[in-house]
Amino acid sequence: MKAQFRIATGLLLLTVLISLGTYQGWWNLHVPAGPLSLIHWLGVIGGAYLLILVPVYSYLKRRTPQRRGTLLKVHVFGNLLAFLLVSVHVADHLGGHAPAPGTGLASAILMVAIVAFGFMLRFGLGPRHRESWRVLHVGLSASLLVVVGIHTLVNFGLL
Ligand code: HEM
């Protein structure tokens, strides 16, 4: 558990650092990669991961309760990586290197809150409010999936 806490904290610090560098324009991730640029792929992959893997986790943890420990590890670290990808993508837009983020900003704000509540829930921070962290984490996730879905449809010109 201590090792997981350290890795999760390290991933969050890495997310802050890479997002800050992207925001400031210390490097250029607008490298063409097929139909999109690298920076766009990061957002697409992070968003798609959330849209698909969060409901899958919810289903599998009930379907195979004996695998709950492994599933939770995948949930925590997979989503932290998705958070990193989406944060870098949003930082690029906020830094003015791409158009204003629009619905992407709403997704980003929700994601920060969800990751923070998930972190407290997983690592037992503020244990007296554990039930509140759970309700906020799960409740905001439902809104996130809707907002990310709308964001995707808008940006692919389907809405
Ligand atoms: C944006 C990313 C995330 C989303 C959308 C999300 C969503 C969810 C959802 C929907 C559940 C409830 C599953 C169910 O009961 O059906 C859940 C549970 C949980 N999540 Fe997350 N989560 C995210 C990231 C994280 C992170 C980064 C952590 C920890 C650092 C975390 C820790 C937990 C914990 C401890 C639970 C409760 C364990 C359980 O009973 O399933 N989550 N999450």
Image (cartoon, rainbow, N blue to C red):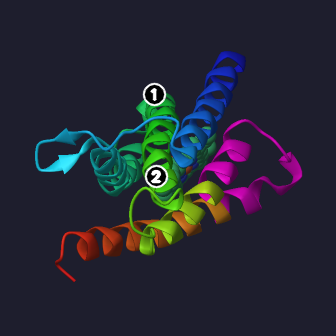
Q: Residues within 10 Å of mark 1 (few under 14, many from 20)?
A: few
x and y, in percent, of residue 69 in the image:
51, 30
* Residue beneath disc 1: 70
x and y, in percent, of residue 145 in the image:
40, 66
Q: Quadrant of the N terminus?
A: top right
Q: Earlier in the sequence, mark 1 or mark 2?
A: 1
Gap between marks 1 and 2, in whole Å? 33 Å
Magenta stretch: residue 121 in it? yes
Amino acid marked by disc 1? Thr
* Label 1 within 8 A of ligand 1 by Cβ: no
Residue in the image at 24% along x and 73% along y: 153
Name the outermost residue toward the left. Answer: 34
Closest to the observer, 155 or 144: 155
Q: Which residues are magenta?
A: 114-135
Task: Considering the whole magenta stretch, tell me its main secondary structure.
Answer: helix
x and y, in percent, of residue 150 in the image:
33, 75
Amino acid marked by disc 2? Asp
Q: Quadrant of the C terminus?
A: bottom left
Q: Which mark is residue 53?
A: none
